[in-house]
Image (cartoon, rainbow, N blue to C red):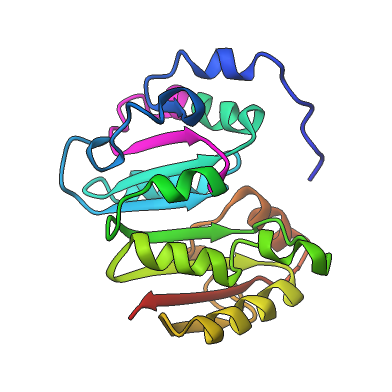
Amino acid sequence: MSRLRKNPLAQKELAIYPFVFDWKLVKDNLELDKIFNNNNDFYLEIGMGKGDFIIEHALLSPPKNFLGIEKFQTVQLIAAKKITNLIPNLDNLKLVSADVSDFLPEIKNNLIAGIYLNFSDPWPKIRHAKRRLMDLSFLTQYNRILKSGGFIEFKTDQLSLFEFALEQINLSKQFNLVKIDYDLHQKQAQEIIKTEYEKKFLADNIKINFLKIEKI
């Protein structure tokens, strides 16, 4: 996919949407466990991009709460416009503009029911391995914020990143591997909620690797 040109007004434009929170501005006043004003299960998509995946989840599962995290505000603005234009009364979806490294430490223990990691930056250079969202250091944080039995679903088109994730899961000893698939869409493409990248990969016949793990 082509790289989006940065919109210098994105932060200002996002401020008009009541369901979008700029973490740098609200972190001292926002209680995440109260963001939805209910006690329903709470799910995160980290790196939500243009929002297709999390919007569809929120539409299909109104009793559940969904929070999309994205550090690139130009991209998140596209998602915000989709929510407003298509489904203005979607009360179970909020967006946060934040870098995940700053955001995760602020989440309370045992709060989250599930985490979605879709086509995260592979950070291919070895010296950048700790930035990968399935690195052991991140898995430790996910384990802290997930409820007992909470899950992580991870998708990537990068086989080397997928194998790295499996190695890190084995090292962590904090999760059970529930499912692993090296060609997720081989038989059930129509049943799976897809991201923007995923739709393009499918059109180009690129295989998608998938795994699901649950907190022990």
State left or right for residue 74 relative to residue 43: right
State left or right for residue 86 relative to residue 110: right
**Residue 140, image x, y percentages:** 46, 68
Evaluate whether residue 63 shows in this view: yes
Pick whichever, 80 or 82, lies toward us. Answer: 80
- The quadrant in which the C terminus is found is bottom left
Residues rendered magenta in the picture: 83-100
Q: Quadrant of residue 127?
A: bottom right
Residue at position x 47%, y 31% from top? Answer: 23
Q: Is residue 92 magenta?
A: yes
Pick whichever, 38 or 61, lies toward us. Answer: 38
Residue at position x 55%, y 85% from top? Answer: 171
Residue at position x 44%, y 77% from top? Answer: 213
Residue furthest left as drawn: 39
State left or right for residue 116 relative to residue 163: left
**Residue 193, image x, y percentages:** 49, 57
Evaluate whether residue 55 shows in this view: no
Up the image or down, 22 lies above or below 139; here it is above
How many marks do you count on the picture?
0
Residue at position x 24%, y 54% from top? Answer: 41
Q: Is residue 209 magenta?
A: no
